[in-house]
Amino acid sequence: MLSFESDYIKGAHPKVLEALVQTNMEVLPGYGSDSYCERAAQKIKDACGKPEAEVFFLVGGTQTNQTVISTMLENYEGVVAAQTGHVSTHEAGAIEYTGHKVLPLPEEHGKIKAADLQNLMELFYGDGNHEHMVFPGMVYISHPTEYGTLYSKAELQAIHTVCRNYDIPLFVDGARLGYGLASRNTDVTLKDLASLCDVFYIGGTKVGALCGEAVVFTGNRVPKHFLTQVKQHGALLAKGRLLGVQFDALFTDDLYMQISRHAIEMADQLKSIFREKGYRFYLESPTNQQFIILENGKMKELEELVRFSFWEAYDEHHTVVRFATSWSTTDEELEELKKIL
Amino acid sequence: MLSFESDYIKGAHPKVLEALVQTNMEVLPGYGSDSYCERAAQKIKDACGKPEAEVFFLVGGTQTNQTVISTMLENYEGVVAAQTGHVSTHEAGAIEYTGHKVLPLPEEHGKIKAADLQNLMELFYGDGNHEHMVFPGMVYISHPTEYGTLYSKAELQAIHTVCRNYDIPLFVDGARLGYGLASRNTDVTLKDLASLCDVFYIGGTKVGALCGEAVVFTGNRVPKHFLTQVKQHGALLAKGRLLGVQFDALFTDDLYMQISRHAIEMADQLKSIFREKGYRFYLESPTNQQFIILENGKMKELEELVRFSFWEAYDEHHTVVRFATSWSTTDEELEELKKIL
Amino acid sequence: MLSFESDYIKGAHPKVLEALVQTNMEVLPGYGSDSYCERAAQKIKDACGKPEAEVFFLVGGTQTNQTVISTMLENYEGVVAAQTGHVSTHEAGAIEYTGHKVLPLPEEHGKIKAADLQNLMELFYGDGNHEHMVFPGMVYISHPTEYGTLYSKAELQAIHTVCRNYDIPLFVDGARLGYGLASRNTDVTLKDLASLCDVFYIGGTKVGALCGEAVVFTGNRVPKHFLTQVKQHGALLAKGRLLGVQFDALFTDDLYMQISRHAIEMADQLKSIFREKGYRFYLESPTNQQFIILENGKMKELEELVRFSFWEAYDEHHTVVRFATSWSTTDEELEELKKIL
Amino acid sequence: MLSFESDYIKGAHPKVLEALVQTNMEVLPGYGSDSYCERAAQKIKDACGKPEAEVFFLVGGTQTNQTVISTMLENYEGVVAAQTGHVSTHEAGAIEYTGHKVLPLPEEHGKIKAADLQNLMELFYGDGNHEHMVFPGMVYISHPTEYGTLYSKAELQAIHTVCRNYDIPLFVDGARLGYGLASRNTDVTLKDLASLCDVFYIGGTKVGALCGEAVVFTGNRVPKHFLTQVKQHGALLAKGRLLGVQFDALFTDDLYMQISRHAIEMADQLKSIFREKGYRFYLESPTNQQFIILENGKMKELEELVRFSFWEAYDEHHTVVRFATSWSTTDEELEELKKIL
């Protein structure tokens, strides 16, 4: 059945898969010490304009959030995140499992505001009892957010400034980073991102890889013995090549951005189709995830013909649903969707 | 360079890779709910002769050990394991990271004895202070062990009996299970294993897959909401198909056992070569890992020509090293090794 | 200086101290197995009308919350609590440190509503993604709350009913329980409480003891090997007698309630004094904690003459402060306060 | 019944109790910020000859071990301890509960050797796989040990040197420190100890207090925001005065050492009695704990007349038992014991 259920419904981009096939019989050392990991890391550092960065490859998004956050926080610190942030809601308590609180911040369409962050910091340090409280030790944002929205460069800059002032790292969850960078409505480049945060990751799983997220520590805040800590989290792949080869392919000939741009074009067409047919959008998303408000009867009907994701109840009679495009979305699929609508 | 460094130096078995290529563009749901995961699980249950079993797919060995052990233990319990067990030594404290002690048991060539286990249990419950101690709540063994050795059916039966008597689960780490089942010196079948332990896993990473371990809960001790707990450990793959497709291929037309038998044949030839050349074995291993005692000067020489693993110091002048065969070892490689030696 | 800073500014009630002095040279076994602990437990079970209850003595409030919550939750569960609950805010992340999320619920003056709880449960189980979320596994309320307010019997009954329907335990933090039971504005007795929750504690530290909280498991939900888990939390006293003797004294001749009633009388007088002098109350508290809104200049003035607690900013020019009475508040102290105001 | 079961069978030393009585009605601030805590800390720093030290008061031994170790270790580190160390055996896994492995070292009568420690460190850093292993990040010793034995100054110096060379802290569990310092067979003073380790604690519970352990960070390795971390462990007393007043009393007029010397004198007499009566000692203990080997029939007989502790089985027919003296042991009690034997 036709599906816009998510951006991970098909396997890998053909060129990524091809790279795995090509390198399959090469003899390589384990645990990420192979030449492909090295080469991919170098390409990523180049793309980020950060020769001093350190790059590590992990397998999945929740794993990456858990490993990065728990290795960067002190015991007495928590991570500040939007109330709707992935770490706050849909990771089954993976952050708390490592002993740290997620400190929720108000959000709008998935985005936090520097002013709210500043306010939280001031309230904390102004509170006479703050030694009995969890210290805000890190800021987590997602870009694009869980609602497909994007921070502007100015917004990132402002959040970055608060973090600097309080000397806490800024971590950007880039599970769908490509779709953010390729959006027509962004002024944030990969280099901007790399200069405005302390650590971020470049999502592979949702942008053309079978699995894999590339963690980039942009400066001097790399956790000590990170490899050992990755192992301790059960997150170290024996065949690290699986990640290195894929990211090497994604960062060869601009494939990562090509893939991403394709998904954005498909999303633009998808938006036009919904708009033409008179559907209501829940919010204006400039990336590959689109949120539509459906009347519940209509939703039931559509479910028979096309797959999409339940997002949340809108009101008694309406539901917010998500349609996602990806590297693998085709013109034919959009054509079919158009007919269905 | 010629390499016998480990059993994960190449990619996937061609048929496994082929399956990934063939299914790449299929639209499938995420998180292990796809038809390939389902089919692979069914084939595994059939092979185990356990229709009532529950099968889950995780990515790597340490991750599997960590997730299985921490979800099966009560807070106040620890896991009993050989002092040389992987969980005791080479997982960077992944078990302790989840709050549980690894209770060490003496071992011989990686194997524990039922009598020692019985003794530990009796000492514990006989100790007037045992309420101030970590309760032994589970037994972990590896088969083959970290030294390539195997338990006999009678030995497994005896350990199983102690576990039953004390009502604690027996967990078998089968990261290299295929190589154990395919050994010429074993009377343990997959069905035996499935009937003698409460949970075990069928290693994929080291037996022909790019990654992946199939966890089999053989009876009624499945942790509650295991999927949620897998997520909480950061161990849930969005593209669960990556694991389902591979295990489906491995359990089609007996591929898993074919691969394993090939590695055993190669290991037998490798043993002959070393024996002919007068090398000394550290122990008699019936599986794909062979441990050789090298004089240190000789070791330095060999290192220039072939890759192998440092295992441990034997004495001041000698070192134990490991040579591993796998599904991917070829006659040519053995021929080359022969020449070198 | 005159102080209404908290209800733990003096040592123990003279009768409690007297009991410690009287029993000091008796030879008693350790770890809570002494006759005083036993006797105190029996008196508490009698007072609760719960012969089947199990009673344990811990040292402090945060320790008790941490130990009870972490031993009653499954790994994948979190505890539901008011956003202002002590476990949510002022325990430095003690709950998260044990791996569990605190799931916040809206509150009014520290109290949650059964309807909000029901709503949270329905939203959770109605969410198609709830297997990727933290399961609500327990409800935590404080009685009196952090704002001195009390649940009515009907309100407790309603919360109890939701918990029963979803089969999750209800835990009542009674750090100041005496002051709640002794309030003139409550219809909740100790027996009511014991029949409406699965576990609660009777606060000693703030109600006349040097330290100590008596945990009461009212029915059949006692965590397995609770003593061992208390030890594992570092919460087991070698000289458990310190707690047993104190609680034995507190539950002899109705001392606990006498102490509590005294504090309530003092609080009533304190309220009258503030009211007469025209001060504004932040909320109507029926217990020993009173929250007054002070103009900031006035606050500075008063601080020179009497100690009280900063609570929170009210607006730019006003602050909410807390005045607490206790077993040790005297008429003379109130007289002095009157003069100061 | 006559009891030598432990050194915590009676309440507090009369002078300690007297101090609690005297100060009971003073108004004091909470959480260890009172003048008694401050004064006691100053006296302890003076006694240690360490003006730069930082002193904190915790409630019990396991709690102190857990809090100190977990706040000083990095995530990827474990604590090295004797196989018989309290943290290894009798704390119900309290260290592992915080995520850290206890790395066992061989011992003799409870003592580790600098050479074994050096060996462990060399083996670790010499192991090519050490990045997959738990890093030894701290050394824990007890003085006196669990067997009543003592390190000589030279032995401590040697352990200290290994720790310095590898830049890891040395932690001394001094739950019974007084009895070690007051031994006739020691050349280790409090000042020596303070200059040879990074952190240690002065046990109160077993040396005359109702509860309480004074943690001394001797130099610049104080964990960041230690108070907050104490709170996070549930280890912060609201009425911190309970600890401050007791330690102030213990460190006034040399009371701590007086108490300790008394116990040692009593132990010497107790040893003479056993020796005269022809009993066999399990080992030569220079402190207040004495270990006697009893024939099992004899043991049963004695149990009817005097309380002592089961320690461990010696052989099929004999048992090691412990007799402990303390500040509260009297000549009369020894006389009675003599008659019984």
Image (tube, coloured by chain):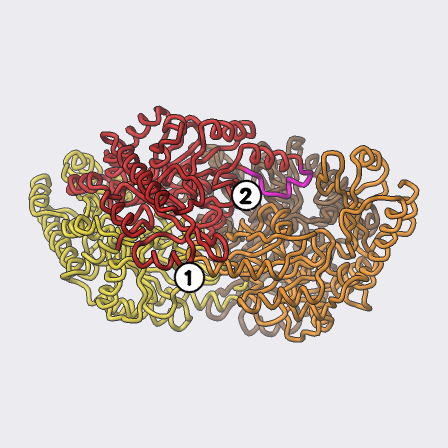
Chain colours: A red, B yellow, C orange, D brown
The residue sitting at 27% across, 61% down in the picture is B38
The secondary structure type at the circle numbered 2 is strand
- Near mark 2 (Cα within 10 A), the count class, few <14, some 14-19 or many ≥20, is many
The stretch in magenta equals: A127-136
User: Percent x, y for residue B82?
Assistant: 35, 57
Quadrant, the C terminus of chain B? top left
User: Percent x, y for residue B183?
Assistant: 17, 60
The secondary structure type at the circle numbered 1 is loop
Q: Which of B280 and A240 is in front in this view?
A: A240
Badge 1 amino acid? His
Q: Mark 1 points at which residue?
A: B225
Q: Residue A305: which quarter of the image?
A: bottom left
Q: Nearer the viewer, residue C234 or D228?
A: D228
Q: Name the residue under label 2.
A: A103
B3 vs C234, left or right, is left
In reply to whether residue C203 is colored magenta, the answer given is no
